[in-house]
Amino acid sequence: MNNDRLMPTATPTTPIKKRRTSMAKLIMMNAPKTEAPLTAAESEFLLEIAKRMFFIETLETRGCDRLDFHDVGVASMKEALEAACRAGVRIGRAKKETA
């Protein structure tokens, strides 16, 4: 993956906080503007992935760094994202078939 495309304003000497801000802005600029909020079932599915893959009890912000931030291995993150992506594709197909 080409990091230059993902973070056009970041350089190796850019402070970490600024790089994260740049990435967040890029993601938000490319996010669909008309996305509906997740349904309860979709939110529950994401929580199940978080519990199973990362042993995270809740996806709610609790205002405590040790509860809100977690060290996550790249392989586990990839597996969780793949599971969420596959589920999204299945949900999209099911909605398309019933429409």
Image (tube, helix red, strand yellow):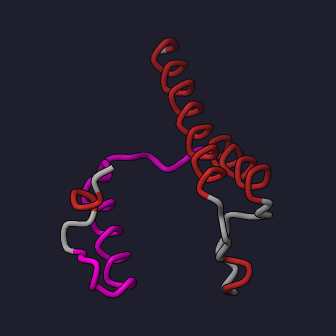
Image quarter (top left, top right, bottom left or bottom right) of the C terminus? top left
Looking at the image, which is closer to me, 46 or 11? Answer: 11
Query: Is 32 colored magenta in this rendering?
Result: yes
Image side of residue 4 versus residue 84, left or right: left
Magenta stretch in the rendered image? 10-39
> Image point 31% across, 61% down: which residue?
28
On the rendered structure, is 40 left or right of 24?
A: right
User: Disc count in the image?
Assistant: 0
> Is residue 76 or residue 60 the one in the foreground?
76
**In which quarter of the view is residue 20 placed?**
bottom left
Task: Name which quarter of the figure residue 55 lies in.
Answer: bottom right
Extreme residue in the top direction? 97
Q: Tell me where residue 53 appears, x and y as whole percent.
A: 74, 51
- Position of residue 31 measured from the top left corner of the image (x, y, whole percent): 32, 52
User: x and y percent of residue 54 in the render?
Assistant: 74, 58
Q: Residue furthest front?
A: 12
86 displayed left or right of 53: left
Which percent across, then down, holds residue 35? Answer: 39, 46
- Residue visible at 59% across and 40% down? 84
Residue 71 drawn above or below residue 98: below
* Residue 22 sits above or below residue 85 on the image: below
Q: Nearer the viewer, residue 7 or 59?
A: 7
Whether residue 33 appears in magenta in the rendering, the answer is yes
